[in-house]
Image (tube, rainbow, N blue to C red):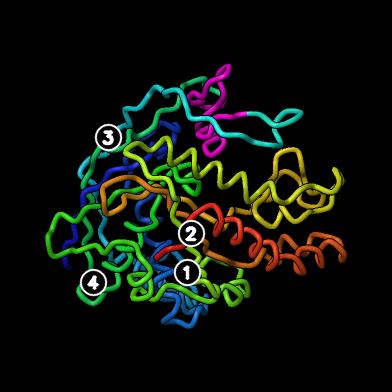
Amino acid sequence: MRKLEYTLSFTTPAFLGNAEQQAQWRTPPFKALIRQWWRVAKSPSVTYDVFKLRAEESKLFGSASDTESFRSGRSRIAIRLSSWNRGAMDRWQASERVRHPEVGRDGMDIGADLYLGYGPLTSKGPDTALSTVRGVAVQRTAINPKAEISRLTLGVPDEDLVELRQVLQLIASFGTLGSRSRNGWGSLDIRPSDAQLVLSPLNRSSLEQWNVSRAFMDCLKLEWPHAIGTDENGPLVWKTKTQSADWRPIIKELARIKIQFRTQFGFPSDGPSPSKRHVLAYPVTHHQVGAWGNQARLGNQLRFKVGIHQNGRLEGIIFHLPCKMPDELVNKLSQSDQQLIRNNELAVWQSVHKVLDKEAARLQ
């Protein structure tokens, strides 16, 4: 076994919680994050075959299954955090505000952090506050960015060392943890404890070397996120034009951009049929699809992170892990609604990319 050690902190508040929904450093979410990015790193070598990928995953991370395909076994990776401390952030400062054209009669300014963090966050009069845990009225907490630090130690088999180092590189570039992490909350800052564990900056040249990109149209043939998409303009990765020493202006900019690419798709009716905006994510507030009800879930493929530029300032990172809408959801729709989704899936995401090309900067 080889030991890999990294110092961890967050660049944005992390709603990383325990069973009581109180913030706490815990190893299970880190193991899940490692598995997530291991799949992305491993997929090209198994030609994006999900069954081969599951078999390799079972060998490395262990499995409780006992079938012909997957035998039970222990994980070959040991994960340890230096502490399981509770998060100390129990108050929320006044938030940045951003214009939303669909709120109120003629649009209004809303809290950018509330827009991207609704659930862990809630409104308190005109301000935003940490919400309370449903049913027990206990206020949530968060892990404070930069102020709270832990050390991650991985025990890795020699034969998997190169692969796992690449996974940690991907997590350093794109990794987020906790509730609403796809919106940039819980953005990880990873620093190697060993000078030999060098992490490359996120740029186009590095991304090409990592071999985790795939043509956008090919990505839409599979139902699971397996690669960073690319199109004729390069990787589907953008950085905000705004940089700051504080995370709040970056969250505001990410909220502004998300509002821009979502509200370009209006709702032609209030009926039970899906619209183009439902391709992005589901549920959509006040616009339920009858066949899906209020239990269906479709996570947004576009993800945010607040990273650290080489100049030491914070910047927003937007990246697309494209995949097609699952057949399980689409097959619940009428024939005409199925055609609406499948005929517009590609065009919807291309329209989103155009907005991002205008509002942010492609990875260079």
The answer to which of 206 and 193 lies nearer the viewer is: 206
* Residue occupying image coordinates x 23% and y 43%: 150
- The answer to whether the residues at label 4 and label 2 have Cβ atoms under 8 Å apart is no
Identify the image quadrant of residue 206: bottom left
Element marked by disc 4: helix
| Mark 4 to mark 2 CA distance (whole Å) | 26 Å
Nearer to us of marks 4 and 1 is 1
Q: CA distance from mark 2 to mark 3?
A: 31 Å
Q: Is residue 277 or residue 222 the one in the foreground? A: 277
Residue 70: within the magenta?
Answer: no
Indicate the amino acid at tag 2. Phe
Query: Total number of numbered labels?
Result: 4
Tell me the residue that label 1 is attached to: 235
Amino acid type, callout 4: Leu
Q: Is residue 102 above or below residue 155?
A: above
| Distance CA(mark 1)–CA(mark 2) | 9 Å
